[in-house]
Amino acid sequence: MTIVYSAAAILLIVIVLIMVRTAFVNKVVEKDLFFDDFPETFRTISVFFISDIHRRLVTEKLLDEVRGKADIVIIGGDITEKGVPMERIEKNIVKLKGVGPLYFVWGNNDYEADYHMLDAILLKHGVKILDNTLVVIESDQGEKIELIGIDDISMERDRLDLALSESDRAVFKILVSHNPLVSGQIKDENNISLVLSGHTHGGQIRFFGFGPYELGGMKKQGSTLLLTSNGYGTSTLPLRLGAEPETHLLHLKKSVAGKSFTI
Ligand SMILES: [Fe+2]
């Protein structure tokens, strides 16, 4: 019996060690995404998308992989959670700012922190907060891309209608929402080409392929491409299993013959 208990204890320790190790993986998923309606004069827009940093410190190893390759950086919410020192959040913001201009949407866990202070830090470092609003990015030739962001859905602070009220239907659109449930609000007539989300952590801990949420990935919904990231950090304890941390470096381009969405 003692041997059985010892074997079980060793197995448990090994699993926990694997979980801790997995939680600190640095992964950049790099993809070319082709869209029929992408404004050609941009040629390519490269987006570094990082979501759900939570308690983690963004590593130099990760930044080395994306530095010099991204036109913009989008933080998809949950840059923090309760109990994370503000200095760590600020350090992460400064690090990410070194990659490119920063855009941010609020996540549910951000509201557990002193979010007035977080707001002040974001503004201090020139981070554009997309809270039910949009920004327009213009090419040298005057073509436009709308980058739209909504506030958190689970906190009932989201107003996609408001964010879209100043939108030009004809313009190529990227929507950022911490919570992927935004897909239920999107209509084909909104003409949103790409949605970037996080929140689910890919289930964070999955046993035999099962977890509380599905794994992150890409899906098509009508003419919209939905990306849900597993996120970079973890809630509370640095433990992951079967759902590696991930960030994304996305190169958005106009479709060429035979190439449309790549999933
Ligand atoms: Fe999160």
Image: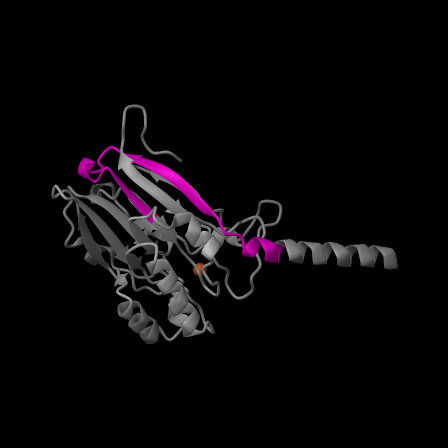
For the C terminus, the image quarter is: top left
8 in the magenta segment: no
> Which is more toward the observer, 24 or 181?
24
> Which is more toward the observer, 257 or 97?
97
Q: In the picture provided, is 135 more to the left or to the right than 73?
A: left
Where does residue 102 sit, x and y in percent of width and height?
30, 58
Q: Residue furthest top?
A: 257
Is residue 226 among the parts visible in the rendering?
A: no
28 in the magenta segment: yes
Where does residue 176 sit, x and y in percent of width and height?
31, 53
Q: Residue furthest left?
A: 142
Where does residue 240 sit, x and y in percent of width and height?
57, 55
> Which is more toward the observer, 78 or 126?
126
The correct choice, above or below, for 35 with respect to 234 in the image is above
The correct choice, above or below, for 233 with respect to 172 in the image is below
The residues colored magenta run: 19-47
Q: In the picture provided, is 209 more to the left or to the right than 196?
A: right
The correct choice, above or below, for 173 with respect to 158 in the image is above
Split into quadrants, the picture shows ligand 1 in the one at bottom left
Q: In the picture provided, is 217 more to the left or to the right than 7?
A: left
How does the figure colour the protein chain or chains?
Answer: one colour
For the N terminus, the image quarter is: bottom right
Is residue 174 among the parts visible in the rendering?
A: yes
Where does residue 261 sit, x and y in percent of width and height?
34, 34
Number of numbered discs on residues: 0
